[in-house]
Image: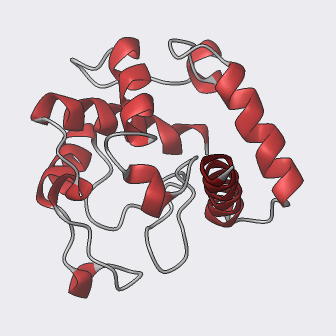
Amino acid sequence: MLRTRGLMVAGVALGLMGMVACGGGETGQQAASGEAAAAEAPAAQQTAAQQQGQMQLPEGVTDEMVAQGKEIFGGAGLCNVCHGPNGGGVPGLGANLTDTEWLHSDGSYEGIVQTVMNGVDASESNVGTAMPPKGGSGITDDQVKAVAAFVFTLSLGS
């Protein structure tokens, strides 16, 4: 009984964190349905911009890297904790990565790699919160490159 209650509390807490992290003007129901749809899409599925031929990936970046980066962003990379599950940012924690405004790089793939590798000092952060190198996670340099590939694609749909 105690274990079941603990799992239920953890599930509710995760659900609330997901609704808070969505930000923007979405309601919890809209965010939940959007997350469900994203979970149903295969990891290797191309973004809408790629399907429409609007996106040029940087040299050396593959669709597979983007898909892997998306998984790392939402998992081991810990990116979604501060930047939200869809990269839209979390007030007071992490910047919006889905718009075309780049705060700590020129928005190039290489610039994003450097920002993730080096982190952002709290004094330079627009939200006043530091981003440690690699987001404070233990991901590898190759995983950072995959995350950067995914983040690069986030603003291209804008």
Q: Residue furthest front?
A: 1
* Residue 57 sits in quarter: top left
The scheme the figure's colours follow is secondary structure
Q: Is residue 27 above or below residue 69?
A: below
Image position, residue 35 (x, y; %):
71, 39
Image position, residue 81 (x, y; %):
45, 58
Image position, residue 129 (x, y; %):
33, 80
Q: Is residue 49 left or right of residue 124?
A: right
- Residue at x 49% of width, y 55% of height: 100
* Residue 13 sits in quarter: bottom right
- Residue at x 85% of width, y 60% of height: 27
Q: Is residue 130 above or below residue 78?
A: below
Image position, residue 82 (x, y; %):
44, 63
Residue 154 vs residue 29, the one in the foreground: 29
- Residue at x 26% of width, y 48% of height: 112
- Residue at x 76% of width, y 28% of height: 37
Q: Is residue 122 above or below residue 45?
A: below
Q: Quadrant of the C terminus?
A: top right
Q: Is residue 139 left or right of residue 89?
A: left
